[in-house]
Image: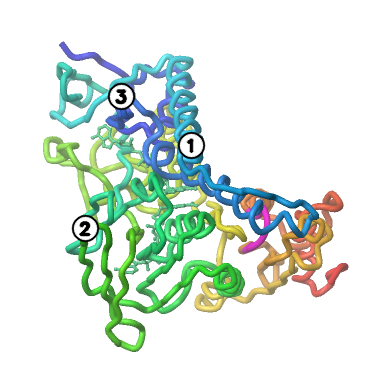
Amino acid sequence: MSKNFDVVVIGGGPGGYIAAIRAAQLGLSVAAIDSWQNAKGGSALGGTCTNVGCIPSKALLQSSEHFEMAGHGFAEHGIGVEGLKLDLAQMQKRKDKVVQQNNDGITYLYKKNKITSFLGLAAFVGKAEGGYEVKVTRAGAPDESIVGKHIIVATGSNPRALPGAPFDENLILSNTGALAIGAVPKKLCLVGAGVIGLEMGSVWRRLGSEVTVLEALPAFLGAVDEQVAKEARKAFDKQGLSITLGVKITKVTSGKNEVTVEYDDADGKAQKGTFDRLIVSIGRVPNTDGLNVVAVGLSIDERGFVVVDGDCKTNLENVWAIGDVVRGPMLAHKAEEEGVAVAERIVGQKPHVDFNTVPWVIYTHPEIAWVGQTEQALKASGREYKAGSFPFMANGRARALGDTTGLVKVIADAKTDEILGVHMVGPNVSELIAEAVVAMEFKASAEDIARICHAHPSLSEATKEAALAVDKRTLNF
Ligand code: FAD
Ligand code: NAI
């Protein structure tokens, strides 16, 4: 016999679990299905983000940053460290504990919100009286059948492999293997200088690997504001992250303990390198595996994304899709916003998700963060703008921290002064970007930020000064 719910959420990542919680808060009966299992076979809620994405990567970034500081940063502060050593097993254990705390947190939230949780793979069976029937299967457990009046598909994404080089998670690693390496590789290659490439490259370089990053595009971080990307590149070069642009990978061959990568460089010359490990971070593909979309005729586009409109409605009545499995940036907070909005639409509310104010953060050192439009995009669109920037070198707090790399840049409309984009590279900009997001959501002008009192000494003063720079009147530079 099947169980009936107002809402069935498929996927327990940041899109799905937040949608489930919001739907329950709104008084709907909710079933939430997720297939992620921990090493003991139990459920591990939180999806890619919690298990092999945002959370474990930030745990390792933090630990490796401490290691680098102890080895190379403390001396300047007059702190000597003797006998420094790396206990990678402990570092990984701590990361696993952080992941588990997050898994447990979501399990608790499901209970608190009276969400019925199912562990297993969900597949559409077909239309049923009162909605859609979904079957949940798991090895060693009986199949279960659920009917949802509304279905929210939040099945996320999977890493894209290089043609002819499938992931073995031993020598050729996706994000999953990259976060679980047990011994620091002497020579590490990353294909793809995107967000994962730079974050994972930073972790392993700090821990002692010689890191080579091979990127297909001729420009470094093409989606990032050019001024910021240039500043970040300078910092990464100085750190010893070897980044080669414009390459074409031609062959990957796994040996017993090493992997050989052959590629044509930007001049078309054949090159070859042998590495202890290869991390492939060339983007992710939407995941609809096992969903049996044909049973209900759910539309999927040629790239594998579930087709949705601006409100996350699919081609089927009362079937919604959110997060990485639909168009838009593959970010946890974007998935969450869509999850909340869909739950609210189900009960007839009229929420709005503004894609123009979705912030991006790359958690390298220096950090990179932005919201809104880049200068090059504005130039290309012909929109008239004014831009102002302020270097952390001239910020008192940054000097006291001993972390003066980078800048804040504010771009505003030439006539109205409305902020169109804010771009940052430097210390703690992952936190500073929130002010810019709020400002843009409230349609603030650069002058609004310039007139707001910011605490002294704080890194946030760089944002105020960059806003002043739009009007060419910085006070401290
Ligand atoms: P997912 O998190 O992928 O969750 C989908 C869930 O659905 C999974 O648990 C999956 O097992 C389950 N599932 C799939 N199919 C079925 C099925 N048929 N039945 C039942 N369950 C199913 N984003 C950020 O914003 N900040 C970051 O710092 C960040 N860091 C990242 C670092 C790495 C290394 C990676 C790989 C990604 C990172 N991301 C980050 C991206 C972020 O993880 C994703 O954007 C986010 O997880 C998408 O959420 P989602 O809910 O759409 O899907
Ligand atoms: P990405 O899209 O950020 O970067 C992929 C890079 O690989 C691009 O620069 C691309 O040009 C390059 N590339 C593609 N094919 C290639 C090839 N054959 N050879 C060489 N280079 C090639 O994707 P990435 O790093 O895999 O991450 C996936 C997504 O996960 C990100 O786009 C982001 O949405 C999310 N993420 C977010 C993080 C954050 O918010 N801090 C951290 C990590 C991931």
In 3D space, how far apart are the residues under numbered discs 3 and 2 (Cα atoms)?
30 Å
Magenta residues, start to end: 423-429
Which mark is drawn over residue 256? Answer: 2
Circle 3: element type = loop
Q: Which residue is label 1 attached to?
A: 350
Residue denoted by label 3: 40
Q: Say left or right for 354 vs 288.
A: right
Q: Residue at x 28, y 49 (%)?
A: 169
Residue 136: image location, x then y, percent? 20, 24
Q: Residue at x 53, y 69 (%)?
A: 240
Is 238 or 311 nearer to us in this picture?
238
Which disc is residue 206 wearing?
none
Measure the C-alpha gap from mark 3 to mark 1. 42 Å
**Label 3 crowding class (10 Å Cα cut-off): few <14, some 14-19, many 20+?**
few
Q: Is residue 238 above or below residue 331?
A: below
Q: Amino acid at mark 2?
A: Lys
Q: Nearer the viewer, mark 3 or mark 2?
A: 2
Front residue of 136 and 89: 89
Image quarter for ligand 2 equals bottom left
> Residue 107 falls in which quadrant of the image?
top left
Q: Is residue 161 above or below residue 325?
A: below
- Up-down relation of residue 24 to residue 47 (above or below): above
Q: Nearer the viewer, mark 3 or mark 1?
A: 3
Residue 323 x %, y %: 38, 44
Amino acid under label 3? Lys
Amino acid under label 1? Answer: Lys
- In front: 203, or 334? 203
Mark 1 secondary-structure assignment: loop
